[in-house]
Amino acid sequence: MSSNTQERTYIDSNIWFAYITQDKFGEESDQANKIIDDIIRQKNSVAVISHLAILEVVNVIRNKVVQKTKHRGQLDLNLETELRQTANELIKEFLDKTTKWSIAEKLEIFEVTKPLVEVWKNTFLIQNAILGQIIEVHKCKICKGVFNGYTYKGVDHYDIQHALIAQEAKVNFLATFDKGYNELRDVFRDSFEIKIY
């Protein structure tokens, strides 16, 4: 790679979440730290994030802070205040870091220029072309008891939208922890490489 060529990596929201929460509400922070810190440190590399990813990270932080907190009895005003404060602190840290890196030109907050209707149309066309997998299951996810049924695993519309934004942003790579992106490798192979960690 020539020294004037900038390597651009679209960072999926799950990596940002792991980076900001540092395993408080999930795992994978070591890998997220390495991915983001490597981009920040390298002279000719820049991370790319979209408004969709920013909104998704904020939403996931709110959900995970509440869902992953161990039950401590009946919800009262003190616990609710604590949960809101924890979520708000993590969201503030995320926005502070992305703003700081944007100012330092190590992060581009990409502005989508395509009309929303075009993004939705392309999302539908890709989603319609990729069926995903229908899998037989024999265990209930909730009670862990015997259960005979089926489940569907496939790329979701948000993943497709992230990939479409990454394509418009002309990135070299899309970095994610989400294995559902495997289904998108062939669709976007001429635009960028999908790196699943």
Image (cartoon, helix red, strand yellow):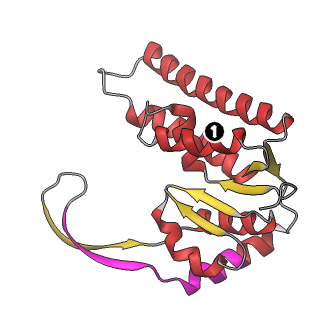
Answer whether residue 60 is visible to the viewer in this image: no
At x 48% / y 67%, what residue is drawn? Answer: 180
Q: Please, which residue is most extreme toward the top here?
A: 78
- Looking at the picture, how far across and down is residue 30, in whole percent? 47, 38
Residue at 57%, 86% in the rendered image: 129
Magenta residues (range):
122-139
Q: Nearer the viewer, residue 150 or 54?
A: 54
Residue 135 point in image, percent of width and height: 30, 76
Name which residue lies at 47% across and 15% down.
77
Which residue type does callout 1 highlight? Asp
Residue 10 visible here: yes
125 lies above or below 111? below
In the picture, the quarter occupied by the N terminus is: bottom right
Query: Picture coordinates of residue 153 (x, y %)?
Result: 40, 71
Q: In this rendering, is residue 31 above or below 50?
A: above
- 129 sits left or right of 125 in the view: left
Image quadrant of residue 32? top right
- Classed neighbour count for the residue bearing mark 1: other residues with Cα under 10 Å, few (<14), some (14–19), many (≥20): few
Q: Nearer the viewer, residue 123 or 76?
A: 123
Q: Looking at this view, name the residue that lies furthest to the bottom.
A: 129
Tally of numbered discs: 1
Residue 6 horizontal/vertical position (percent) = 81, 55
**Residue at 25% across / 56% down in the picture?**
141
Q: Does residue 64 show up magenta in the picture?
A: no
Q: Which residue is mark 1?
A: 37
For residue 157, what is the image quadrant?
Answer: bottom right
Q: Is residue 124 magenta?
A: yes
Mark 1 lies on a secondary structure that is: helix
